[in-house]
Every structure is written in structure tokens, then in C-alpha cells.
Image: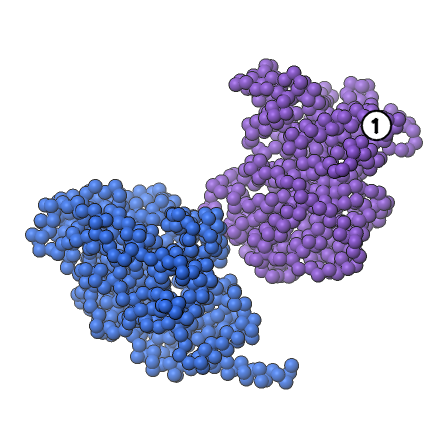
Amino acid sequence: MASNSSSAQQRLRIIAGHLQKRPEEENASVAAQECKAEAPRSEPSSATPVPRRRQEIMKWNGWGYSDSRFLFNKKGQAEFTGKRYRLSGLILPSLKDWFEGTFGANLQHRSPATPSLNLSAVAPPHLNQPFVEDLKAAGLSVSHDPEDRVFRAHGHCLHEVFALREGRIGRVPDVVVWPSCHNDVEKIVELACKHNVCLIPYGGGTSVSSALECPREETRSIVSLDTSQMNRILWIDEKNLTAHVEAGIIGQDLERQLNERGYCTGHEPDSMEFSSLGGWVATRASGMKKNIYGNIEDLVVHIKMVTPRGVIEKSCLGPRMSTGPDIHHFILGSEGTLGVVTEVTLKIRPVPEYQKYGSVVFPNFQQGVACLREVARQRCAPASIRLMDNEQFQFGHALKPQVSSIFTSFLDGLKKFYITKFKGFDPHHLCVATLLFEGDRGKVLQHEKQVYDIAAKFGGLAAGEDNGQRGYMLTFVIAYLRDLGMDYYVIGESFETSVPWDRVLDLCRNVKERIVRECKERGVQFPPLSTCRVTQTYDAGACVYFYFAFNYRGLSDPVHIYEQVEHAAREEILANGGSLSHHHGVGKLRKEWMKASVSGVGLGMLKSVKEYVDPQNIFGNGNLL
Amino acid sequence: MSADALGAEADGFFDMLEERRRSSDLSYAFRSFNPLPYRGATDISASTLNRMVLESQYLSYVIQEIMLESDEPREMLLEEASALLDEMSQNLQLGFIRLLGYAMNKVFKSVFSSIHVNEDGLTRLQQAIQEYPVILLPNHRSYMDFLVLSYIMFTYDLSIPVIAAGIPLMGMKLIGEIFRRSGAFFIRRAIGSDKLYWAVLSEYVRTIVRTGYAPLEFYIEGLRSRTLKSLTPKLGMLHMVLEPFFKGEVFDISLVPISISYERVLEESLLAHELLGVPKPKETTGALLKARTVLKENYGCMHVFFGNPVSVRDLVKGKINHRQYNLVPRDLPMKPSKEMQEFVSGLAHTIIRLQERNVVLSAWNLMAVVLLQNLQGIDLDLLTQKTLWLRRLAQRFGAHLRWPENVSDSEVMSSSVSLHHSVVRCEGGRVYLVEEEGPGPVTQEEGVFKQAAAVLMCASYRNQAVHVFTRPAMVAVAMTTAASHRTDDIFHNFTFLLELFSNEFVVIPGQAVQDFEEGCSLLQESGVIGRSDEEIYVKDNGQETIIFLRAILQPFIESYQVVFRYLCEESSQTLSEKMFSTNIRSFIMKLLISGEVQSYECLSSDLHKNVLSALLRMDAVTKTKV
């Protein structure tokens, strides 16, 4: 044994060297990259703002760009089409096995979507003629084209997309209007009040709370107010590091344009390719890198919103004020019930010099959570730190692209051997934390060491930059993957919560278990995928994200079952001390729990604000209250 | 959470001793033992478990509280807690399970003719153990209970449970230590208001459940039943066990009611003497060795029924608002809310009802019911006839009877009589109760005492089956005492009986209507009574059954009456509890001698205790501390 130990150590050093790429080698390539977790577009210069006819570049019945989708090719291999993403054009050899194995799905059993929108299924618009005429007279761009209307009648909840795929179209807005500046919005709101129509603000359309659904009981003409054309950065104040931006701009455009000037907001929600600044404000969005830049409420300095009562805004750009309750907090999270956010002044930061991904493998989820808790206790969280459970770790692995050389695959084999055999990690229990460090180079390296040292105390092993980067990629492609699942009888969704540290483990276990048990009780034939990750750390708790999907073959009403299970999962979250939502918002999907969440008096307060600001219920999307 | 919903079980027993008799004790003890563990278990040692308790936030909160109240320094309290834990904690080791298994194998094979276990119950238990923390809840009729259970678990590759035991067991030299290493942990009897003890014990129990350390076994009745009748449940332990579920620390908990029944109980004569006020012998190793003679006897067959695991999560649905824990740290000591107390109490009673429902009865239990109505002796033929009649009635009432197959009825009777030679004897075709041997009665009192001992021994076997008859019998009594045939009147009297006897017979609180309906419909289905919209009447051919059922309750009614009489006539306004028990005994003794009271069961101290509890509950007497 003794004679072996030195050679074992040497081998260990060599293997460890393979596991962790040398930083020197990486610097150049990383520095050349854009400051972004995953560059959504490969060629920034070719980007154009969101067109009015979104359906020209985006799917009408699924997630994202029309040219980007997962499919199983003739050989049964998964591939991702298009050119936009790092994964685009690549073959993913292990996805099929994972997919079939996890869900009991079969490539022979297809459940394809209706190929195109059946225009006759769309009810004719219920127009308020005088209103439309006044809009046109004011020179505003208006449409009642069925495709435009259908596109704005939904977010990306499972039931919404599922219905579209089946060609079922419910109540859709009667008119779409595109303001191009704050004044246009003022005009529209004024006319809406005058003619008593219902306005539903529409930003990026990425809602997952049924917030964009037209209320069934609404009898007035419904007007979708699409903010996408209000997308300019109006000014950048380099002395105070703020930018004044129109609220319709989408995340990727905002970041790219700021990057061109050497700045960023650092606000990167997973939906940032499509979601809008106004939408972030209206839902209290949270970004992946909030540990450095803060959540949306920390980022805004000034908000301008048009309400039926007029414009609400503060009188100066002071960084903090004591002037009674902060009126921004009536606006943040108002979910389109009070008015339209038109312009926002945001904090900006210089683009960081250096960015580095990382990952740590833990023997089990408990150890991983304990490590994140310690990182939070020491307040040394990197820009992003996320902990995936074992199921998600395996999911991530299924998305590994085909390796180009035998050498790489040999290295992968060695890594696996090292972790599972040499270190004794059980492949069915180990889990991975993905890390993103940002800042000036020296500090990043120092910071990195600090975090890895903490991780080591909890049995964590550094597992390389690739694993980290792939983890973040997962969040951008997961929504595309759902569409692939739906082609093969698999439906799913994600939902989130925030919870005090000491309850994180219990909540994760109980919610996952509840999902499994509910599926079984409701006759789902195959065990569901029920997985979670801790995506944000705070001083007093964490944000937890669940993915839940199952094979619905043999079920007559899969969406209903899905909804029942999600409902039960939310009940479980609440019973375990979790919040109703960390950043997705309430919409109509989670309204029933609002009173219990904020107390009767709390709800009354919000209602009385609504009554004062919008007595006619012009902003009648029916969210939240 | 009605017990009915969970259903009675089909017969599917096998004799586990059969296989044991074919193999050697040693190879059995050294068999490979590979239980399928709880999938959520964290693999920890007994000492880690103790350390977790000592380092728990909960204990630190409690110590903080005690420090404020008592000025004792933290280190002292921690040391004290550590000592308590050392006294309390188990130290489960497979080696000792093997040792115990070896010994038990020898003993059980010699004292029992068979140990019947329901096979599907074992299968369900094996499944349950893997899924969630499991709590084993056996009824408690004999010292053998927990030994038999661990023996079964070891034999069938089920995780060995840790067992809450009374501290007197620990006091036995060597044996105490063997039990400790076989998974027993020891709880003091009178904990009272010792805050630190409660804290250590409850955190110990919670940690076992939370970590899925091992299945946890405890007697929900709290004590060994001296009367072999179910005792009303004790709630403290159940509260501790359930807390990790209520606080979301485990997804679910499976409660497994276990019904153990002995055709003949090892302690039968000790029990009767204890009830008559002869103190129970101290649990010492010496006494145990002396008791070896007991092991030379035959105790017939034994039944162990593992009930359906009950999911706490399913039962709690909608009854408890878990969010009450959301706004305070979960480790903070908190009094259980009212809704919680009610839930736990209802659950505990339900468990006992499930134990009763599944308990396997023998011909002997029914014979005892008949014998107690014929204390002067009964012709064997008549006894047979009545027992067979009662068998049909009991089966209609849902009793879980095991009647030997392929054996003539007369053989069943005679083998029962010979097995129970300590209770009955058959002479010239007549069956009599056996009185203890010894020098002829010197005084009248000694004579009464001997007769009472015989009756109480016989009564304990009736008690094993009494739950089958309580509800219909209470309806029968209520029908006799009610002012009219009106259902309302009868129900009124029924609820009175139910309340009065709720320390005597286990009833789920707040379910009087269901109990009444159950009693009535059993009688109706057996053709004993008829019902119209508003009335209940006895059918012509039902009179015999009604009388018989009333007679089952008669000893209880008479006992209660005589205690009332004593309290009204003899006692001054206040008396001490100790005085009460001695005075009442001599009061009843006199009445028995004079013939004013017939039932020897009136002498049972258990009854006296229950009467007092009932009167206290019904505000007829009050209790003050002196």
C-alpha cells in the first residue's frame, strides 16, 4: 500500500490537472467573449429589434426563434437547429437515451403540433370602432390581424402552449397597438379611458403565470398594448452610471447596446433573450447575477408609468429617499394592473474585465446546500452560484454535444472514473454547483479560491469550467427542450419559490416527493421527472427552482392533471415555508393564494391602490388581485 | 379518520416457528441479515445520534430557558443533558440482536406451539420501511411483545426497530444492557415537569424519526395492560413522533398498528394478583431467573398481525394548517395547538381501534365470555353449544377469529380447557373455574380473594375479546334503561354509557353517532333488533342475545355502581387517593361476603382507577394536590 501511495498521488495530480483547465490558457479566450452568461446571438451586429410581426421570426406555438428547435433526426439522434446558439447545429448523442429512459417515452410515439394557425378558429375581433378610429387619427400603429392577436393572447404556461399546439384558440385581444414612445402611451391610455376599453400591456410575452390570458368575463374590447417598439436607450449618464431606457427594450438588446458603450446592467434573467425591461419591473424580476448587480428593485433608480390617473414618477434621481412608502414598490410587481411602465432609469456598470465559469461536484445534495449556505453566511457568493440536484446533473449530461476527439471522450471517462470510483461519489447521489465569477482578474482568482476552499470543506471537488458553462446553457435551452418533449407525449414546466435556509432541504425533498406521489395517484403511467436546483442565495434564504415533466400517454386530459399536480406542489411549497413566488409573479395562476400570502389587510391595501389609480379597471388583465 | 375506512384484513397467516424448528438455533443466529433500508436514511451511528441531540438548536433553546429560570450554568445543564441521554439511549448492535435471536429461538420454540404472522402484513411493512420513517405500534399484553417483534423483524430481514421501554427494565443487571444493545431505549415513568428530561427525550425521539435511523417502536397504550383490555392511549410519545412530519422534516410517516394476541399469556396469574392489590414483583434479573419455571409451561399459539401502514399525511389532509410553523424557527419549543392535540388524540384512538379490529381471537376468548356468566360451573356440552353460538355472533360483529381447521368442535373445546388448566378444569362433564391451590381458606376474606383471582384471570381472556361486543352491548343496555323505544332516548342513554365507560373501552372522541350506528347496525344485521324511522325494538328471537350482551357489561356496571355507592355512603367529603384504593377494597369485600354484590370483578383496582377518572372527567369529583 505504502509503495503505491506516491504513484497514486502522482496520478491524482495528473488527473486533477485534466479536471481543471489551466487559467492562463483560458484568459485570452474568455476576455474576448462578450460579458454574458451565454451569448444568445452569435453575431451581435446582425441583430435587429423585435419586429411588430413577431411571428416572422418567432414560433407562434412554442418557445423562441422559429429557426431554433430540437429534433430527433433520422438516425434518432437529437440535434439543435439554427445558428444562434452555441449548441446550434450540434448533435447531442446522449439525449435520446436520457429522454427515453427518464420518461419512458419512445421516438415511435409522436404527438406533433398543429402545423399552422387555423385562422377560422380565431373569433372575429370585438372592435370598439370609435376607439380604433381615434387611435388611427392619432397616428398610432394598430392591427386586428388574427395572427398578431393570437400571438399576444398567451404567455408560456404549459396549458397555453399545449392549447396552441392543438390549435385551440380561446379569447384573444381584439386589437394590437404599438406605441413608439411615452407620449403614445399617454394618448392610448387616455383614449382607452374615454372609450372604456380594456388594456393589457404586452412586453416580451414570456409570462409563466397566465398573466397575458384575456379574462373570460371581460365584455369590453380588449386591446393588447405591445411595448416592443419603445426600445431605445434615451441617454447614458457616465458620471452617475445610470441609463435611461424605454421600457419595451428586451434584455439582450439592452445588454448588447450597453456593451457597445462599455457598460452593462448585469441583469440577466433566464428569459433575457425575449423579456422586456417593463416586464421585469412589472413582475419584480430577478437576474442570474443578482449577487453582484442586484435584482430589478435594486437596479431601478427611477420609473415612469402611465396610469388612468396620469403619470406617476419621482421628482429626482436621488439614490434613496425617505418620502413615505416607496412609490416604486406600488409599481414593481403590479403585473400590468395599474398602468404601463414606459421609461426606466437603471444603474449601469462598466463591463467586467474578466469572467470565469466553474463547477463543483458534491457527494450529495445535502452537502451542496450546506456549502451554499456557508457561502451565503460568509457573503462571498460569486456573480452566480447554482446547485443542481442529481436528476438535473444527469439531465445536463444528456445535453453534452458530440465530442470531437477520442482524446476528449477519454478525458471525460477519466473524470467520471476519478469522481465515482476514486472519490467514491455515488453517481445517483452526486450533484453539481455551477459558478460564474466576474470582476477584475486578480479578484476573481482570489474569490474563486475562497469559494473552492469552502466547497472542499463540504466534500466538494472542482469539476471544471465546461460543466459550469453547460449548466448555464441549460437554462437558455430548457424552454426549447419542452417543445421537443411535447412532440413525444412529454409535458412539463418549471416553477420557483424562495425559502429560509433551514427549510431548503426539507422543501426540496417534500415538493419533489409530492409531485411523484400526486402523479401516481392521478394515474400518470410513468414516474415523472421531478427535479430542483437552488438558483439564488440570500443572507436569510435561497431561491429554489423546480422542473417537473411527465409522459402523458394514456391520459385523457393531461393538462388538467398537470395543473392539479402543480397546484398540489404549490400547496406543498407553502406548507413548507416557501413563498408564493420569488420572481415569476402571481398572474392569474397563483391568485387564489394571494390573500393567505399577504394577509387580508395587505390585499386590501393593494386593492385600494388599484381602485384609486384605475377606477374603471382599464388595466383589466385580472392579475394579482 | 374512522377506523372502518381502513378495513379488516383477510386471513393469511403462517406459523413462523415451523421453519425454525427445522433448522439449528446457531445457524439461525448467524444467518445473513440484509434488510432493505429506508431510502431517505442517513447512515449514522448511535453515538452520532446522541451528539446530534446534544448539539440540536432545540436543546439549546430549552437550556437557555432553564438557565433563566434556575441560574444553573449552561455547562452544568449540558452535562446533565448528556447524562440523561446516556441513561436513555439505545445502542443497537447486530451482534446482540443475533444473541437475543438465538435465545428467543430457544425460548419461543419451547413455550409456544406456534407463532402465526400475517404474511401480507410483513410484505407491506417491508415496503413501508423503504419509503418513509416507520412507527411500529403494537398493543401491549406481555413482556414478550417487543422481544417477539424484534425476533420477527430479524427473521424476515426487516430493519431492527429501536424501542421505547420503561426504565425498570434497564435496572436489570446485564439484561438491561442486552436490551439496550438490542435497540431498547429507556424512558422514566414519572417525568412530571422535568423540563430538561422532556427536552432530551423529545429531541431524541424526533432525531430518530427525522434521520430515519431505524423504525421506532412504542406502546401507544403507554403501559402493559393488566386486564388485557385495550388502554386509552397516551399521547406524549405520539406528539414527539409526529412533530417531524408536521414541521415538514419528513415527507410522511407510516404508522403500523400491530395486534399481538396470546392464546395464553405468560403473566396471567401475576396480572390477576396485581389487580387485587398484590404488588408486582420488581423487575430484577434474579426475579427473571426465578421465572424460568414459567417457561416450562405450554402457552399455545400466538398471533401477530401487522396492520396496514397508515399514512399520517393522508390522515392529516385539511385538518392541520402547517403554515403555523412558517413564522417561527422550527426548533423553537412550542406548545401543540388545540387542533393538533385533537388530531393526535383522534389518531391515537384510531390506532387502538385498528389494533383491536385486527387482533386474532381464539375459541378460548369466547369460552371465557360464557364462563363468566356461569361462575357456578357449566356443563361442557352447554358450554360448547353456547361458545359456538357466540362464535357466530362474534363473526357477524366482525371479530377476527381463528378456529382450528379440520378439528372437531369438542376437540377445540377440550384442548382449550387443558391448555388453560390454570383457569378452568373439567370434572364429570362440568367446567369450573380453578382456584389457586394452597392451605384451605382461613378467613372468609381469603376465600373471596381466591375466587376473585380466578374470576379476574378468566375475565382477562374475556377482555381480549370485549371490544367486539362493546357497542352492541351498550345499545342493548341503553334499550333496557331508556324511557321509551324512541331512537332519541336510546341514543341519549347510549352516549351516557359511552362517556361513562370511555376509560374502560376505547372510543374515538367525538364519534358517538358513528359508534351508535355501528352498534345498532350490527344488531340489526344479526336479526336482534328492528328499526323504524324513530324507534328501535327487540325482535322476538333477539331477546336472548340482548340479555347475553347486557350480561357482558354487567360486571362493569355493577362495579361502577358499587364505587358510586361507596363515595355516596361511606366516604367523607375528601379522601386521599391511596386511602381510596384500600378503603374501597375492604368496602367491596364486605359486600361480596354479604352477597349484596355479586361480581368479583368489582375488586379490580383497574376498575376503581377508571371510575375515578370517569367521575373526574364528568366533574362529579375533583382532585386536588395536597
Seen in the image, is B65 located left or right of residue B578? Answer: left
Subunit ID for the residue under disc 1: B
Tell me which residue sits at (52%, 65%) in the image.
A428
Specify few, some or many for label 1: CA neighbours under 10 Å numbering under 14, 14-19, or 20 or more.
Answer: many
Q: Residue farthest to the top?
A: B484
Q: Residue farthest to the left?
A: A137
Seen in the image, is A156 located left or right of residue B241? Answer: left
Q: Which chain is tinted purple?
A: B
Above-or-below relation of B3 to A341: above
Where disc 1 sits, the SS reads strand
Q: Quadrant of residue A128?
A: top left
Q: Position of residue B131 (x, y in %)?
A: 56, 53
Give the residue type that dot 1 points to: Val
Tell me which residue sits at (43%, 69%) in the image.
A94
Q: Position of residue A162 (x, y in %)?
A: 33, 53
Above-or-below relation of A440 to A537: below
Tell me which residue sits at (49%, 63%) in the image.
A365
Above-or-below relation of B622 to B333: above
Q: Position of residue A425 (x, y in %)?
A: 54, 69
Seen in the image, is A382 located left or right of residue B154? Answer: left
Coloring applied to the structure = by chain
Quarter of the image for the C terminus of chain A: give it. top left
Q: Nearer the viewer, residue A214 or A423?
A: A214
Tell me the shade of chain A: blue
Give the number of callouts: 1
Quarter of the image for the N terminus of chain A: give it. bottom right
